[in-house]
Amino acid sequence: RGGVTGQVYVRALKIARVDFSYYVPLPEVVAVRWCAVCQAGRTCLVNGRCDNGEKPKENAAPLRGGGTLTIVMRNAPLVAYHALSGALDASSGLASISASLGATAVASLVRVVFQGEDVSAFELAVPSAAAGEGLAEMSVPPGDA
């Protein structure tokens, strides 16, 4: 409603409050793709395809090992790496990045494909393993670890 002309109105600051906190989101693997043979060049997958235009296998690799896993993660810790080769920067103090595949197999880093604020991709060499299904777990220590 309107005010009365000539009348003085006192304005007061109104404040609303709510508890708020920032958090560090947990890393999450969003895709695992395996290629028997990689594309030539900087990354194994080009336009989502392995060498010879083959589609990569999703969430699986053969028992015999070999080939390359491309693991895409959301909220992975940022690591220092060489943009041209994808190799970890030795001066960062980061020893390695690996993935355990089931109870016995450990895939080792080939290169960092890319890193962004939200999404990162890593390529790992696939070891031979025992038959069966198991939990796959990616380990990316923080760059200052």
Image (spheres, rainbow, N blue to C red):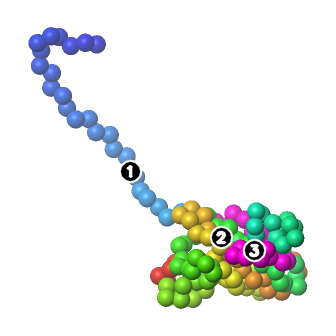
Q: Which stretch is magenta?
A: 26-44
**Residue type of the residue flagged with mark 1:** Asp
For disc 1, the neighbor class at 10 Å (few under 14, some 14 to 19, many from 20) is few
Residue 136 visible in this rendered orientation of the protein? no
Q: Residue at x 65, y 73 (%)?
A: 113
- SS at mark 1 in the image: loop
Place of residue 140 in the rendered image (x, y in percent of width and height, measured from the top left): 59, 78
Place of residue 32 in the rendered image (x, y in percent of width and height, measured from the top left): 75, 69
Q: Residue at x 63, y 76 (%)?
A: 112
For this rendering, which residue is in front, 136 or 96?
96
Q: Any mark on residue 44, and which?
A: 3
**Residue type of the residue flagged with mark 3:** Cys
Q: For residue 27, which quarter of the picture?
A: bottom right
Q: For residue 9, which quarter of the picture?
A: top left
Mark 3 and mark 2 lie on one chain; the one further toward the N terminus is 3
According to the picture, the residue beneath numbered tag 1 turns out to be 19
Place of residue 144 in the rendered image (x, y in percent of width and height, measured from the top left): 47, 82
Q: Nearer the viewer, mark 1 or mark 3?
A: 3
The alpha-carbon separation of the residues under discs 2 and 1 comes to 35 Å
Q: Is residue 36 above or below residue 13?
A: below
**Residue type of the residue flagged with mark 2:** Ala
According to the picture, the residue beneath numbered tag 2 turns out to be 121
